[in-house]
Structure formats: structure tokens, C-alpha cells
Amino acid sequence: MNISRYTHDRGGSRGATALCLVAMLVMLHAVRATATCPGPDEPWGGDDEGTLTCDAAVSKCQQKAAKSVATMVGSILKCHARQAKSAMDGTPFDVRGVLQLAGQAARIFPEKAEGIEVGARAARLHFLHAAGWDNVPGTRIATYVIHYKDGTSAEMPVISGEDVSDWWQYPQRRFNGKQGKVVWTGRNPACRNLGATLKLYKSSWENPNPTVAIDRVDYRSQMTTSAPFLIAITAEGK
């Protein structure tokens, strides 16, 4: 897995380093197609009422979207290249891949991914993530373990219904999480036929020890029904 990072200057006072996760991608749901680009003046992002318009090249790219979590992310990269690198709810993310963990509904994936390198101080970390398969609200489905350079560590739990939910969302199951926020919404023929949309969520972690550099992050599934996945991390400086 390749890790890349960049510094995003916000008015010269606050920087952000985006850690891009690129993994070997395996088919998760053969029947779940990827997100497609929105049409002219069609809403693009979750609860955001703003619109984006795809040009001819982007529209042509839509036809290549396949049926998996991996190609869902590929669709974001190909069809929303500039949009995906822009701020999502005020946070820039460099979207290039997906890190899929296992759950009881998808045991073929690894249960953890360790050693996601940060190597910098940060006031907060922002996670762009979601999960396959829903769970009982309030259930911890994953954990981020943040390791500092001084040997100490901290944890951020990922709670179903609070931080993330199933990336396939139906109108009767509207996400109302207090910790996470929907920052990207996509559509494809498969989910549209079932009245669903595809969603990605952003959760933010306030660093209790911002003066000490963060060495790395471990990502661990709690092996509940849900299979959590991570797309990108942004480390924001003061």
C-alpha cells in the first residue's frame, strides 16, 4: 500500500496533510455498482444543496464504472477527479483507493491494517470512511489507534449510526449521526432501482496531545456484522 501526503494551506494559518490510502482492491458486493457522475445541475454531496456539472469526458467515464467498492472509489477518482480532491465539508481529501476490513458479513478481508504512516504533528485527524452492511446503532464497528512518536497512543472508536453507516442508504434510514457527517453522495442504476443512494462519511478526531508528533495509525475491525472501510485520512495542523 502506497501512502502519499500533501500540505493544504488554508489562508496561511492552518495547514492540512492528506494521507492517501492506496490498497489492492477486492470485490466486496458483486451486485453493488459504482457511483456515477451527477448530471447537469444535479446535487453532488450528501446534504449539500450545491451542484456540479460533468463535462463530456466525465460523462464518457461514467460508462466504465464497475460493480464493487473498489470501482466505486475508482469512479470517484475518474469521474470526480477535481471534485474528490477539493474540500469535503471544509476538509481536503486525496482520494485514490479504499482500505477494506472484514466483518461477519465479509470475512474474506483482513481484520486490521497497521502502520499507516503519519509522521507529523496534528491538531486533528479527519477520516473519510463508511461500511458495508448496517449494524445496530451505537455499536462500535472499528477502532483507529493513533500512535505517537513518544510511544504513547490514543483511540478513536468508529460507531455505527454516529460516525458512519452502510454506504448504501435508503430514505427510511436517514443518517443522523452526531460524530460523522455525510460528505459525498453518489448514484448508480443498481441502487437507484432499489431507491437507495451511496454515501461516504467524514469523522473528525481532536488530538488531545497536539504537541507530540503522530507516528502512525492502526485501523482495526471489531468484527461485527459491518465491514468497515477507509478511503482517506487528512491530518490538520494548527
Image (tube, rainbow, N blue to C red):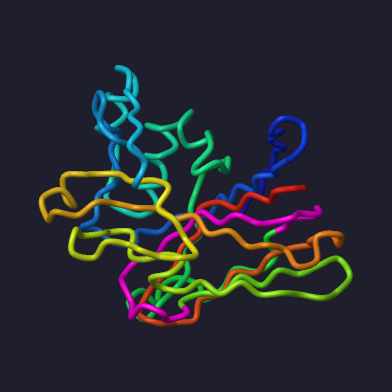
Question: Which quadrant of the rendered structure holds the N terminus?
Answer: bottom right
* Whether residue 19 is situated above or below residue 158 in the rendered picture: above
Residue sticking out furthest to the right: 150
- Residue 104 falls in which quadrant of the image? bottom left
Furthest toward the left, the residue is: 193
How far across and down, in percent of the image, does residue 57 sit?
34, 19
Q: Which residue is drawn at 18% across and 64% down?
A: 172
User: Residue 109: within the magenta?
Assistant: no
Q: How many labels does the image show?
A: 0
Along the line of sight, which residue is nearer the eye, 91 or 115? 91
Relative image position of residue 77 (x, y in whole percent): 44, 37
Extreme residue in the top direction:
56
Q: In this view, does 56 lie to the left or right of 172?
A: right
Vertical order, 125 against 41 (above or below): below
- Residue found 82% across the figure and 76% down from its top: 152
**Residue 26 placement (x, y as % from top left):** 40, 59
Which residues fall within the magenta stretch?
117-140
Left or right of 224, for residue 20: right
Dividing the picture into quadrants, the one containing residue 64 is top left
Residue at image point 69% right, 43% down: 16
Residue 121 left/right relative to 108: right
Residue 160 placement, left or right of 88:
left
Q: Residue at x 42, y 61 (%)?
A: 130
Residue 123 shown in magenta: yes
Q: Where is residue 30 in the image (x, y as percent from the top left)?
A: 25, 58
Image height of 213 relative to 222, above or below: above
